[in-house]
Each structure stands twice: as C-alpha cells, then as structure tokens.
Amino acid sequence: MCGRYTLFGNWKSALPPDIILDDLIEFQDIIDNYNVTPLQTMPILKAVNQDIHATAMRWGFVPAWSKETTPQGMINARSETVSEKPSFRHAFKQRRCLIPMNGFYEWASSPSGKKQPVYCTSSHEELLFAAGIWEHWTSPDEQISFDSFAIITVPANSLMRTFHERMPAFINKDSFQSWLFDSDHAVGLLMPKPSSECRSVYVGTGVNNARINNPELIRESPPILKSNEIFPTKPPSGGGNSRNSNDNSDQGALF
C-alpha cells in the first residue's frame, strides 16, 4: 500500500539526463514535501511520443468515464488486476508513468489498535520511482479538467510484510524505457523491491496529521510496539484503493 510518501531535496538531479523538464516550469519551486497526501499535485514522469517528460499531476486516479462532479480518485492500483479492471486497463495499456519519491510511510499496527508510523526508503538512500498509471478527466459540465495518477502496488517483500501486505512497485532506471514504452513487457516489471535494498525506521506520529510537513516527520523514533505485537495491515478488497477507503482514523481517510 502507499497512502503517504515524501519528495524533498535536489530530486531533479537524480533524474536521467534525457528527461524533459519543460512541463515542470510552473512546478520548479516545489517545496520539500515530507508528507505527500492524496489530492496533492506532484511530479510524475510520462511518455510523450518517444521522449520522457516530467510533469505535475494530482494524486488520486479518476477514470476518464467518471461522471462524478467532485471525484476523489483512487490512490493505488493492484499489479495483479491493473491490466484487467475497467477503471485501469486502458490507462495501463497506454498511460503508464513513474512517480519519484524519497520514501513512503506505513503504519505498524497491533491487535489493541495501537499504531506507529514507519518510514520506508531505499537502503542506499537513492531516489525511488514507483510504477503508476495516469488519466485525463473532464467534468460532465466540461468546467473542470485535470490529469491524475495512481501508484501501482505489489505483494510486500519480507521486510515490508511486517507492517502491510502491499507495497509500491518500484522501477529501476535501466527499465524506464521498457516500462513507459513497451506495453507487452510492462506487467513483468511489477515486482517487489528486494528486502536487502529497503530500509525501514519507526518515526513519530506527526505524519498522521496531513497539515504537518517538516523534516522531523522522518526522524527515527523509538518503537512503541513490541515486535510480537505487530501484525500486517490488510488492504481493502478490490482492485484499487480510494482516498476514503481507510481503516485508520488517525491517517485522515487516506487508505
């Protein structure tokens, strides 16, 4: 699962040199974001003809055919069904994308209901690129239109499985071209990042509040749960996770 993530620092310098940044002109002065939440507008990478462009989109995938007047969108799509579900299949075939992030949050949970955020990153502290899909949506009255994206999730690796049964699918830089341009082989790239390449630390509860956004959110904090108390969170059933499908009231209705 992925309901919160981070993007901060000089992340553009970690992009491959052939990425075209022209579409990010209005997004050049991005503020370091240690608490990215659904409905925020964030950078993504997408295919445009034979090039890769960086642009900004809203997090919360809305199918083009949606007739809602104020759609919330779906923040995640399962790798097992993203190529089949009516909401996602056309986007998966034609509009795959990459979402840059420094890391993402999960929540360690106990049967008593006690929870603590966990911050998950690359063990090498490198920028991560989550697999995603995007779509353009226009309201029924044609007064509102925007592009939106969802993060694709896969079964969690052994490290992440301690906290949640799902995790984002990450694409290595040497597979960018295949992911963005080769529909026939895209599904084969959706797999968990090895546990040896991941790192997780307990952090404070500040990230539970969507209004808090500062570096303290990712500072390591002593665990408040014993290891034998933790059980993995199960995602809601279905092929995608809407902004409102949440079993943790402290997280602001994000899962």
Image (cartoon, grey):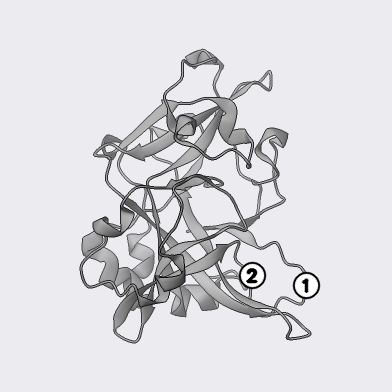
Judge the density around disc 2: few (<14), some (14-19), many (≥20) Cα neighbours within 10 Å: many
Q: Residue at x 31, y 52 (%)?
A: 10
Amino acid identity at mark 2: Val
> Label for residue 189?
none
Q: Position of residue 243 (x, y in %)?
A: 67, 53
Judge the density around disc 1: few (<14), some (14-19), many (≥20) Cα neighbours within 10 Å: few
Q: Residue at x 62, y 58 (%)?
A: 39
C-alpha separation, residue under disc 1 versus residue under disc 2: 9 Å
Q: Residue at x 69, y 35 (%)?
A: 248
Count of numbered circles in the view: 2
* Residue 99, visible in the rendered structure: yes
* Residue 83, visible in the rendered structure: no
Read off the residue under disc 2.
62
Q: Position of residue 140 (x, y in %)?
A: 77, 83
Q: Do the CB atoms of the residues marked 1 and 2 lie less than 8 Å apart?
A: yes
Q: Nearer the viewer, residue 181 or 209?
A: 209
Read off the residue under disc 1.
68
Q: Position of residue 24 (x, y in %)?
A: 41, 70
Q: Earlier in the sequence, mark 1 or mark 2?
A: 2
Q: Quadrant of residue 148?
A: bottom right
Q: Residue at x 48, y 72 (%)?
A: 92
Q: Nearer the viewer, residue 249 or 85?
A: 249
Q: Quadrant of residue 158?
A: top left
Q: Position of residue 22 (x, y in %)?
A: 36, 77
Q: Helix or strand or loop: what does disc 2 sit on?
A: loop
Amino acid identity at mark 1: Glu
Most extreme residue toward the front is: 29
Q: Helix or strand or loop: what does disc 1 sit on?
A: loop
